[in-house]
């Protein structure tokens, strides 16, 4: 049995955490570059990593919002592909997953 309210609270907490992290990344990326060429090159590499982390965060936010929509629609924990229940153990690991284990494996092929 899935405790939907607990899952919703966990998803909302993760969404808040990601929002905070993305604002921190944006603030860091807004810093003016160093005037020293070597430092600027190192900063640029760091900025690229931050940009990748930011994109990963944005992708996760989209998945979480989709999961929260499924909660609102009464469809959370049901595979969007086959309609079977998603195992609670899978939701423990991937709370925003829209797919059961079998459908996820089929999509990955």
Image (spheres, helix red, strand yellow):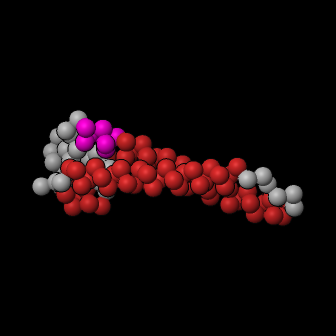
Q: Is residue 89 above or below residue 108?
A: below
Which residue: 36% across, 50% down?
Answer: 12
Furthest residue to the right? Answer: 36
Magenta segment main secondary structure: helix
Write the residue at 43% across / 46% down.
61
Q: Is residue 50 depicted above or below 77 in this figure?
A: below
Looking at the image, the residue that sits furthest to the top is 73
Is residue 105 a member of the stretch shown in magenta?
A: no
Quadrant where the N terminus sits is bottom left
Left or right of 58, for residue 108: left
Residue 28, picture quadrant: bottom right
Image location of residue 16, percent across then percent down: 43, 51
Q: Residue at x 19, y 38 (%)?
A: 74
- Quick check: 51 left or right of 12? right
Residue 57 drawn at (x, y percent) = 49, 51
**Residue 82 appears in the picture as rendered:** no
Figure quadrant of residue 90:
bottom left
Q: Residue at x 22, y 44 (%)?
A: 76
**Residue 18 locus on image (x, y percent):** 47, 53
Looking at the picture, how far across and down is residue 91, in whole percent?
Answer: 25, 56
Q: Nearer the viewer, residue 1 or 55?
A: 1
Q: Nearer the viewer, residue 22 or 107?
A: 22
Q: Which residues are magenta?
A: 66-72
Q: Nearer the viewer, residue 38 or 33?
A: 33
Asked if one can make out residue 93 in the rendered structure from this viewpoint, the answer is yes
């Amino acid at each position: 049995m899935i405790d939907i309210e607990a899952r919703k609270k966990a998803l909302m907490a993760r969404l808040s955490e990601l929002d905070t992290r993305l604002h921190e990344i944006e603030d860091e990326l807004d810093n003016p570059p160093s005037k020293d060429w070597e430092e600027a090159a190192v900063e640029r590499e760091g900025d690229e990593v931050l940009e990748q982390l930011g994109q990963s965060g944005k992708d996760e936010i989209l998945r979480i919002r989709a999961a929260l929509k499924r909660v609102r629609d009464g469809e959370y924990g049901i595979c969007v592909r086959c309609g079977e229940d998603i195992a609670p153990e899978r939701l423990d690991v991937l709370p925003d997953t829209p797919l059961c284990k079998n459908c996820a494996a089929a999509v990955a092929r």
